[in-house]
Image (tube, rainbow, N blue to C red):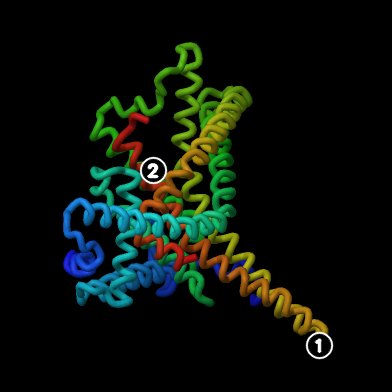
Amino acid sequence: MANDPIHQFRLHDLVGPVNIAGYEISFTNSALFMGIIVATITGILLLSARKGALVPGRLQLVGEMWYGLVDNMVTSIMGEDGKKFFPFVFSIFSFVLMANLIGLFPYFFTVTSHVIITEAMAFFIIGLVVVVGITKHGLGWFKLFVPHGVPMVILPFISLIEIISFLSRPLSLGLRLFGNMLAGHIVLKVFAGFVVTLSALGFGGVLGSILPLGMTVALTALEFLVAFLQAFVFATLACVYLNDALHPGH
Amino acid sequence: MANPRDTKDNPDAKLGDISSRLKDLGGRIEAEKSQTTAGTQSSMKYQGASDYSKGYRLASEFVAGVLVGGLVGFGVDKLFGTLPLFLIVFLLLGFGAGILNMSRSANRTPPTAEELRNMPKPNDDDDEDK
């Protein structure tokens, strides 16, 4: 089990199987960690906003930077009228970031390493784009798929390609986050497993295991970078896609 | 915030006439701006560190395009019972969509960099997260 790199992604019920109307809705470790994530985000933000000092302390600075980062992202991509989506983007960013970071603790479960979670978020974002686009612009929103300045002869092909390109967005959005988290955690586990296997070989093995140990440390640092970066990329792309709903002109 | 500047400003620009003070202020703003761009330089390094994620992003855009094209083609074929025909057509279209996605996302990377540039304060935050 120690050397099984997939074992960390296994779901198990915490309170026994719960079935309602044929659907299993058990409380799993994934659900537990989602609760922990939300509680952590709420806790940090509430604590950092508690004082509201003019000159921020360390914790308040974290909260302000957190807010400022997402605020800048939203306004620089969507403009001023994109502010409506600030709460949404902030929630998405915070959830993904905290899920990635909490998953880095040993023995903790990484919520975003399950494709169903990331794809659910991605499809929700794209669904929101379609709903907002149609309610704001009516059928004119579908001009998104008809780029102007294209000759009539190849227009059907181009718009077909545009539609496929649009449909592939949720897939790539969700798969990217899932793939990064899954691959990172598996690689980490595999290299850490080398340490155990090598050091069982005796003195030479213990000496040799320094190499994969160093690699594990380096990979952990890389995983922290990836955890932040993927949350950032996920939120940025959510903004870019939502921008298509608000301003379908380009 | 204006007060400490003024008291610092007055002994500096002894002439007291407004235009020279304005000039001084402009120079100071310029200096501050160049400082911010210096900060941007360091965040360019951060960009370099994220080449890995950029490559991964492009690859996933392309794969997703082909996958969706194949899926749509397969679905159409299932509907009309013309199995290989539309699968092939839509796979090719999906290939095109993948290329389109990739070139779009490669052109889109500047906004991400610009966005990092646009944030004077969160810039520091990024450096911290590096």
**How far across and how far down the image is residue A161, in percent?**
50, 27
Which residue was labeled with disc 1? A203
Q: Looking at this view, is A77 or B91 the one in front? A: A77
Measured as percent of width and height from the top left, residue B64 is found at: 54, 41
Assign the C terminus of chain A to one quadrant of the image: top left
Q: Is residue A180 left or right of residue B15?
A: right
Are the residues flagged by discs 2 and 1 in contact, CB closer than 8 Å?
Answer: no
Residues at discs 2 and 1 both on one chain: yes
Which subunit holds the residue at mark 1? A
Q: Nearer the viewer, residue B73 or B57?
A: B57
When the figure is inspected, residue A239 is found, relative to residue B21, above or below; the finding is above
Q: Which residue is mark 2?
A: A240
Against A90, residue A80 (above or below) is above
B121 to the left or right of A185: left
| Mark 2 burial class by Cα count in 10 Å: few <14, some 14-19, many 20+ | some
Q: Nearer the viewer, residue A74 or A231?
A: A74
Q: Position of residue B104 (x, y in %)?
A: 49, 36
Q: Which residue occupies 56% across, 58% down?
A: B49
Q: Is residue A9 visible?
A: yes
Looking at this view, is B104 or B74 the one in front?
B104
Q: Amino acid at mark 1?
A: Phe
Residue B125 in picture, x, y percent from top left:
40, 65
Q: What residue is at 46 percent from the left and 62 percent from the top?
A: A228
Per the model, the C-alpha gap separating discs 2 and 1 is 55 Å
Give the answer, above or below, for where B27 lies relative to B73. Answer: below
Which label lies toward us, 2 or 1?
2
Q: Which label was assigned to residue A162? A: none
Image quadrant where residue A232 sits: bottom left
Which part of the image, by quadrant, shows the N terminus of chain A? bottom right
Q: Is residue A2 left or right of residue A89?
A: right
Kindly identify the amino acid type of the residue bearing the numbered disc 2: Val
